[in-house]
Image (cartoon, rainbow, N blue to C red):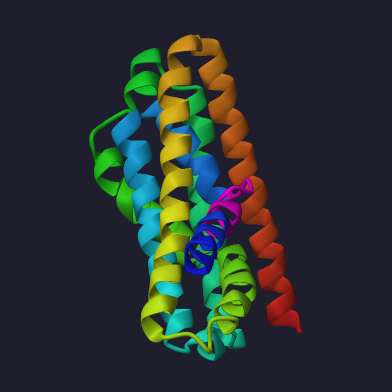
Amino acid sequence: MEGALTFLQFIVLGLSLAAPIGPMNVEVMKRGLTEGFLSSWLVGLGGLTGDILLLLAIYFGFAGFMQLTIVQIVMYAAGSLMLGYLAYDSMKGAFSSRLALLSGGNSGHSRSSFVTGLIIAVANPLSLLFWFGIYGSSLQTLAASSWMFSLVCSFAVILGLFLWNLNIVLTVHFSKRLMNEKFIRGITFAAGMCLFGFSIHFAVQLYRLVVN
C-alpha cells in the first residue's frame, strides 16, 4: 500500500513539473492550433524524450557536469536562439494566409516537430532547475530503496509528464473546433509573444553569466 502511494506521489510530481506554463506548453498549444494534432503530439513526444534524457542524466550522476558555467552558457544561448526563432515563426504565421494558417504551411513542420520539442526540453535551463532541484531531491529520498523501486518511481514521473502532454494535445485539438480564424490568429500571435519573452529572459540570463 505504501509503495502504491509513493508511485502515485511521483505521478503527481510529474504532472506538477509539466503543468506550469513554459516554452514547451506554449509551443504544443500553438502547434495544435495551427498545424493540427500530429504536429502538436510530436512536439510533446520530443519534449518527453528530452525530459527522459535529463532524468537519466540525474539518475547516473551527471548533475555536477550540467551545472558547469560553460554548459549553462551554451544551453542559455541555444535556448534563446531556438525560442527566438519559434517566436518569429509563430508571429509570422499569425499574419499568413488562411490556408497556411490552418494547415501549418507545409509538411516539413510536422517532420521537424519532434526535434523542436526535443531541443526545447534539453536546451531549456528552466527544465534543468526543475529536474535537478525538485526531482533530484525527491530521488534522494529513495536512496535507501532498491534500484528497481527507484526506477519504477522514475517511470511514474515520466507517466505524469505523458498524461499532462496528452491532456494539452487533446484539449487543444477538440477546443479548436469552437474557435474561429480570427481567434486562432490572436492565440498564435500571443503564443509568439510568450516565446519571445522566454527568449529575452534566457538572453538576459546568458548576459549575466558571461559578465560574471
**Highlighted range, magenta:** 13-22
Q: Nearer the viewer, residue 61 or 156?
A: 156
Could one spot residue 33 in this view of the protein? no
Residue drawn where x is 41% and y is 55% of the image: 159
Residue 84 position (above or below residue 121): above
Residue drawn where x is 72% and y is 64% of the image: 204
What secondary structure is the magenta-colored segment mainly?
helix
Residue drawn where x is 36% and y is 80% of the image: 148
Could one spot residue 115 in this view of the protein? yes
- Is 18 part of what is drawn in magenta? yes
How far across and how far down the image is residue 144, in percent? 53, 89
Drawn side of residue 198 relative to residue 111, left or right: right
Residue 194 position (above or below residue 62): above
How far across and how far down the image is residue 176, in percent? 45, 18
Residue 205 position (above or below residue 12): below
Q: Quadrant of the C terminus?
A: bottom right
